[in-house]
Image (cartoon, helix red, strand yellow):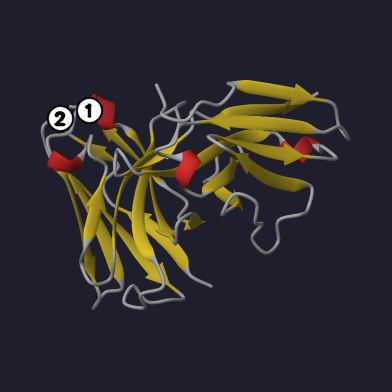
């Protein structure tokens, strides 16, 4: 049982938009920055979004992040088959004094 | 550009100590720019943060693993290491080293460690 809650799976057609939610509490998302990671099959996770809504160099603007209260959302527009991956949210939990991740969401581009 | 590479035994016996090393290239573990982290992922499961170390030697560990984990840094070799004691099958996972600055921005490729007799 992960501290951060994500839907196990989402799907959408190529070219469409999808959002992935990440729900937490005041001890984690509510008071700390959220980051998002993309893990393509058989590879290491890759930073997609940091500090709630910032994109590292090289990440296309099709990927966006937002946060409201104790929830965060990753948005992906113009879906491509190459976006099929597992997506994880993560943040620091001040009560646990530990970094925590969501359980991951598998994106299928139909 | 900093790059990370994990190394160590791929098979560890139950009750023994798992030992992994992360070699840093393109940067220095002494730079103070990063915290140096370990994260693991059991087969088919999600990510679990193990802990991190700063170049000064200060550490922070996941409370659920704290009693069994030691992370250390070797500035002379530009490496940092993970030791996890008293392993069981539940510790079977891909182990990643990563840099962190409030988020994990650079990751190694990961190394699979299987705990089995």
Residue placed most toward the observer, A77 or B15: A77
- Is B49 displayed left or right of B86 in the figure? right
Question: Which of the 4 image quarters holds residue B55?
Answer: bottom left
What residue is at 43 percent from the left and 59 percent from the top? B100
Q: Is residue A27 above or below residue B105?
A: above
Residue B23, placed above or below residue B69: below
> Could you tell me which chain the residue with mark 1 belongs to?
B
Q: Which residue is mark 1?
A: B116
Image coordinates of residue B10 in percent, x first then y, are 30, 42
**Residue B17 visible, this angle:** no
Residue A56 in picture, x, y percent from top left: 64, 60
Q: Nearer the viewer, residue A44 or A16?
A: A16
Examine the rendered structure and indicate whether residue B73 appears above or below residue A19.
Answer: below
The answer to the question of whether label 1 and label 2 lie on touching residues, with beta carbons closer than 8 A, is: yes
Say which element carries label 1: loop
**Cα distance, mark 1 to mark 2?**
6 Å
Q: Which mark is residue A109?
A: none
**How would you rate the neighbour count of disc 2 (Cα within 10 Å): few for under 14, some for 14-19, many for 20 or more?**
some
A76 in relation to A105, above or below: below
Question: Can you say which quadrant of the picture contains the N terminus of chain B?
Answer: bottom right
Disc 2 target residue = B14
For the point 37% across and 77% down, which residue is it? B28
Q: Residues within 10 Å of mark 1 (few under 14, many from 20)?
A: few
Nearer-N-terminus badge (1/2): 2
């Amino acid at each position: 049982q992960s501290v951060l809650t994500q839907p196990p799976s989402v799907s959408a057609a190529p070219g469409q938009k999808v959002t992935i939610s990440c729900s937490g509490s005041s001890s984690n998302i509510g008071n700390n920055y959220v980051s998002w990671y993309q893990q393509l099959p058989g590879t290491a996770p890759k930073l997609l979004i940091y500090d709630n809504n910032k994109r590292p160099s090289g990440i296309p603007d099709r990927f966006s992040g937002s946060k409201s209260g104790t929830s965060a959302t990753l948005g992906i527009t113009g879906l491509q088959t190459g976006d099929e991956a597992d997506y994880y949210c993560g943040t620091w939990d001040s009560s646990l004094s530990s970094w925590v991740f969501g359980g991951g969401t598998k994106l299928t581009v139909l | 550009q900093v790059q990370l590479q994990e190394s160590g035994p791929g098979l560890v016996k139950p009750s023994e100590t798992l030992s992994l090393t992360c070699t840093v290239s393109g940067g220095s573990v002494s730079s103070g720019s990063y915290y140096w982290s370990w994260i693991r992922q059991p087969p088919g499961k999600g990510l679990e943060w193990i802990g991190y170390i700063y170049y000064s030697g200060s550490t922070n560990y996941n409370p659920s693993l704290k009693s069994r984990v030691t992370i250390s840094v070797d500035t002379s070799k530009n490496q940092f290491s993970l030791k996890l004691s008293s392993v069981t099958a539940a510790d079977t996972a891909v182990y990643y080293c990563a840099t962190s600055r409030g988020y994990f921005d650079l990751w190694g490729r990961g190394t699979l460690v299987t705990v089995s007799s």
